Amino acid sequence: MSTLRIESQDAGRGVTVVRPAGSIDAHTYRQMQEAMARLLATRASVVVDLSAVDYVSSMGAGVLIHVHAQLEARGGGLIVAAVRPTVMETMRVLGLTQVFAFAPSAAEGVRLLGEATGVIS
């Protein structure tokens, strides 16, 4: 069975960096969904650092799509960062490279969100 650990860090100015580790799939997507729901209550923008994620299923991608839509509706943003090549291939096949903004690192994602909101750290 898949495992997933999720850590989050306040990057300031309403931005949170979320760092899941493991797989986001049919067995773990609810855990990711619950963690993201808690953040949506208080955060305007989120960087999801996927550097420690080895697999994202369509259900896991669905969580990210939902979060992206919720944040955009509130004027916030979502950036997916540090994506491994195998996970990026899944994103490409699902058409998500046309939906999400990507950054090579979480720090770069935070910087890009700052520029998008006019707040530069």
Image (cartoon, rainbow, N blue to C red):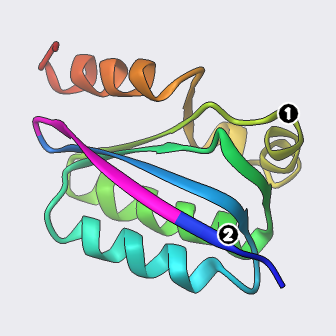
Residue 31 lies, in percent from the top left, at: 53, 81
Residue bearing the label numbered 2: 60
Which label number is shown at residue 48? none
Q: Amino acid at mark 1?
A: Pro
Residue 31 versus residue 56 in the image, above or below: below
Labels 2 & 1 near each other (Cβ < 8 A): no
Residue bearing the label numbered 1: 85
Q: Amino acid at mark 2?
A: Gly
Residue 43 lies, in percent from the top left, at: 19, 56
Q: Quadrant of residue 117?
A: top left
Please name the residue shown 83% across and 42% down the image.
92
Give whichever of discs 2 and 1 has the lower sequence position: 2
Q: Quadrant of residue 103?
A: top right
Bin the neighbour count of mark 2 within 10 Å (Cα to Cα): few under 14, some 14-19, many 20 and up.
Answer: many
The stretch of residues the image draws in magenta is: 6-13
Residue 9 versus residue 70 in the image, above or below: above
Please name the residue shown 20% across and 57% down the image.
74
SS at mark 2 in the image = helix
Please name the residue shown 33% across and 76% down the image.
37
Quadrant showing the N terminus: bottom right
Q: Is residue 108 left or right of residue 116?
A: right
Residue 30 lies, in percent from the top left, at: 56, 85
| Number of marks present in the image shown | 2
107, 112: nearer the viewer? 107
Residue 70 lies, in percent from the top left, at: 34, 64
Q: Find out whether residue 62 is within the magenta segment.
A: no
